[in-house]
Image: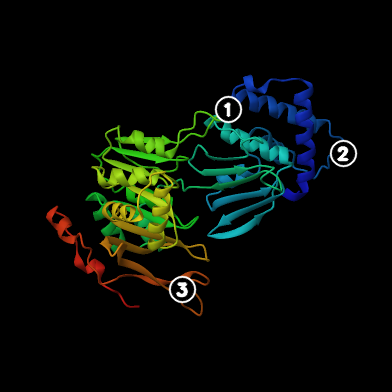
Amino acid sequence: MRIQARHPWRKRVHDQLLETIDLRRRDLTRMSDAELRVETERLVREILENLADLPSTVDKRALTQEVLNEAIGLGPLEELLADDSVTEIMVNRADEIFVERGGKLQWYPLAFTSDRAVLGVIERIVAPLGRRIDESSPLVDARLKDGSRVNAIIPPLALKGPSITIRKFSKKRLGSSDMVGFGSVSEEMVRFLQICVRHRKNLIVSGGTGSGKTTFLNLLSNFIPEAERIITIEDAAELKLNHANLVSLEARPSNAEGRGAITIRDLVRNALRMRPDRIVVGECRGGEALDMLQAMNTGHEGSMTTLHANTPRDALARLETLILMAGMDLPINAIREQIASAVDVVVQQTRFSCGSRKVTSITEITGMENGRIQLQELFRFEHKGYGDNGVGETGKAVGHFSGCDTIPSFYDELRQQGAHVDLNLFDRRLA
């Protein structure tokens, strides 16, 4: 019997399971995970045995597993989380699930049995992290054990019912050769950025939602020399660095009484007292941008973060706005001077309509002139359209990576530090 055909039976068995647990007044919270699974499976089998009208065509084993997943696991999400081809999961409501595969959105045939079941899954995700979701706090960011990012929002804010969005992260730690192989970046770009990281240039990875900023920040962070001490700071931990001297910090929301919140800004300030060589902030969204810039300017060179912006110029404008959110009454020129002196390079990530993600620009900040931050593009992706008529893969972004015939202003500084920078990296390539 197909998945959709089992859905009414799954709902019926799940409802009976909840009633049975309620009637028997079982305190499931006192059981271990293994005991809970054994007891729940026993109850499900008991319910199935008593269903006289259950058609013989229903696969009892599959039905039992689906009910167990929803009762004590993550329901229909279990199968999707195990599927490496799925990169994003979107639950719009109990009976409306979409997934992203290969950059394309697809409807998924399985569904939750009810809003209550969706809410139960959300609570099972956030409770172990000390977070909560209820009417007084109807939205939450969290993560799964594998590092996948979770956002959940419930009524009254979500009008169709509880909603979950999960952005999965590859189990394999992607290296630069993987990114080059995917066509996300060129070898020349990687070689230049590797030199920048090793020689302590301050970097910002800019891009829109789902453009691959965190993945690329992770790649850059793994270029940091092994001997250095790194502090990572995130709202929900996602970065996977492979360093011995690493401390990972995660922000914390307030409790039910509205107390105890620890913000990204609190953690950035605290990190300065932890003797870091580098500070890596998963994403700057508020006043922590000011503390981050001050750290970059005061002995913590080589630090990195990400920003939501569609161009390098937009990234700097957003940075100005975030610094103003710190509550300091600073003149705009002073803010721009601080940005110009702190940030060395902006790496722009773009997600194309075909779903592919690419580094579309690497831009250097060269200083200030007439109150305006000066930019110099070093590399770009020349987008030529989408594959068709024998050119490129059908529907995929077509183009080529190229230097901009521009040498970075800090080239001499890199050479004095012993870095070998091949000037041919920056040559324009016509195609």
User: 425 and 176: which one is in front?
Assistant: 425
Residue furthest out toward the bottom: 389
Q: Quadrant of residue 45?
A: top right
Would you call the spot at circle 1 few (<14 residues within 10 Å), some (14-19), or many (20 or more)? few
Mark 3: amino acid: Gly
Q: Which residue is mark 3?
A: 392
Look at the numbered disc 3 and give the secondary structure of its residue: loop
Q: Residue at x 53, y 66 (%)?
A: 353
Residue 174 appears in the rendering: no
Q: CA distance from mark 3 to mark 1?
A: 57 Å
Give the spatial CA distance, label 3 vs label 2: 55 Å
Seen from the viewer's position, the closer of residues 429 and 9 is 429
Q: Which residue is mark 2?
A: 53
Q: Which residue is mark 1?
A: 257
Sequence-first tag of 3 and 1: 1
Point 36% across, 38% down: residue: 268
Residue 130 location (% of width, % of height): 54, 29
Above or below, comparing residue 413 to residue 57 in the picture = below
